[in-house]
């Protein structure tokens, strides 16, 4: 969640009045969350939840 929040904060200046940048950032956050969760060892990921 912290990483996703940081990604949105970094992408914030690129937001304008259209929905396209927002959808792109949400999709990027989702992809990065999956990548980071797969990068964690199984036992460490299980202990977080």
Image (cartoon, helix red, strand yellow):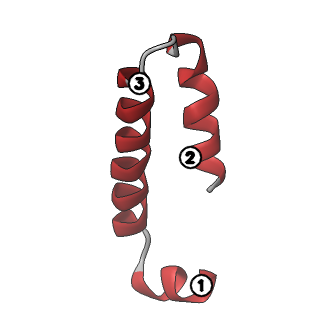
Q: Which residue is mark 2?
A: 4
- The residues tagged by marks 1 and 2 sit, at their Cα atoms, a distance apart of 17 Å
| Location of residue 41 by image quarter | bottom left
Disc 3 target residue: 19
| Crowding near the residue tagged with mark 1, few <14, some 14–19, many ≥20 C-alpha atoms within 10 Å | few
Q: Which badge, 3 or 1, is on the more N-terminal residue?
A: 3
Q: Quadrant of residue 27?
A: top left
Report the disc number at residue 22. Answer: none
Mark 3, mark 1: which one is toward the viewer? 3
Q: Is residue 48 left or right of residue 32?
A: right
**Quarter in which the C terminus is drawn:** bottom right
Residue in view at x 34 percent, y 56 percent: 35
- Dot 3 crowding, Cα within 10 Å, few <14, some 14–19, many 20+: few
Image-based side of 45 in relation to 35, left or right: right
Q: CA distance from mark 3 to mark 2?
A: 18 Å
Q: Position of residue 29 (x, y in %)?
A: 44, 45
Instruction: Work out which quarter of the rendered image holds the N terminus and state it.
Output: bottom right
Q: Secondary structure at mark 1?
A: loop
Numbered circle sitting on residue 49: 1
């Amino acid at each position: 969640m912290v990483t996703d929040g940081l990604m949105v904060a970094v992408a914030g200046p690129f937001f304008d009045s259209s929905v396209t940048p927002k959808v792109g950032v949400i999709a990027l956050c989702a992809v990065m969350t999956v990548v980071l969760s797969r990068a964690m060892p199984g036992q460490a990921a299980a202990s977080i939840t």
